[in-house]
Image: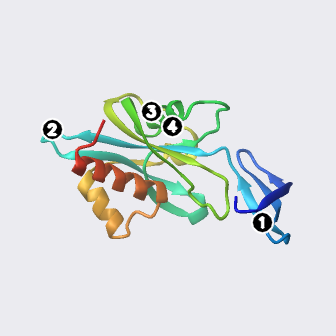
Amino acid sequence: MAGFRHLDDRLVHQGYIWHVAVARFESPEGEEFERDIVRSPGAVAAVPLWHAADGTPMVTLVRQYRAPFDSMVIEVPAGMRDVKDEPTEVTAARELVEEVGLKAGRLEHLLDMYPSAGMTDSVLTLYLATRLAAVPRQTHGPEEAHMDVLELPLADAVGMVLRGEIHDAKTVIGLLLAERRMREGTLG
């Protein structure tokens, strides 16, 4: 860690899932400084990729209300790691069923990412979900109950990313990685 030392955390707020701490650090030169950090159990997301009857690669996304932005946001299915010790693959599979009514026959790990390294210790694990089968949705909470499920050609979704119509980081990264895997023929 290049000579930096984490000295301690002081809890400022304990929420349902997250808590906020003021963390104290020491620089390599011995200078002490503080940073606010949102402590998080992390999250999981999956890019549901399937093919239409004509062979067109398709993705299933959601448009849901996001309170921090007070607007509807287009995203891949995702959720918090709010079940203690639940493997990320199980969380991803559960979120696919809850949000879009899909059961994945295969979940392939794409990457672990830091969604906002300057403010939270959250790690988001991103999967590619394939061999999908429709199952009943099991929505939780008002946002999921009112979300729209979108089925789009992968090329159209990537076009939305490139035009700046999709802003969510995990979705941008997931769609671009899925498109690249399709182009390179490296899907599992």
Taking 133 as reference, is 6 left or right? Answer: right
Which quadrant is the C terminus positioned in?
top left
The amino acid marked with disc number 4 is Thr
Q: Is residue 15 visible?
A: yes
Residue 53 is tagged as 2
| Circle 3: element type | helix
Distance between the Cα atoms at labels 3 and 1?
37 Å
Distance between the Cα atoms at labels 4 and 2?
27 Å
Residue 139 is tagged as 4
| Circle 4: element type | loop
Which mark is nearer the camera, 4 or 3? Answer: 3
Mark 3 or mark 1: name the one nearer the start of the chain. 1
Q: Are marks 3 and 1 in contact (CB under 8 Å)?
A: no
Residue 113: x, y in percent? Answer: 53, 52
Residue 181 is tagged as none
Residue 35 is tagged as 1
The amino acid marked with disc number 1 is Arg
Which mark is nearer the camera, 4 or 2? Answer: 2
Q: In this rendered view, identify the residue nearer to me: 106 or 146.
A: 106
Which mark is nearer the camera, 2 or 1? Answer: 1
Q: Residues within 10 Å of mark 3 (few under 14, many from 20)?
A: many
Q: In this rendered view, identify the residue nearer to me: 120 or 16.
A: 120
Taking 146 as reference, is 28 left or right? Answer: right
Mark 4 or mark 3: name the one nearer the start of the chain. 3
Label 3 belongs to which residue? 97
Mark 2 or mark 1: name the one nearer the start of the chain. 1
| Circle 1: element type | strand
Residue 50: x, y in percent? Answer: 27, 39
| Circle 2: element type | loop
Quarter of the image for residue 53 reads top left
Residue 103: x, y in percent? Answer: 39, 29
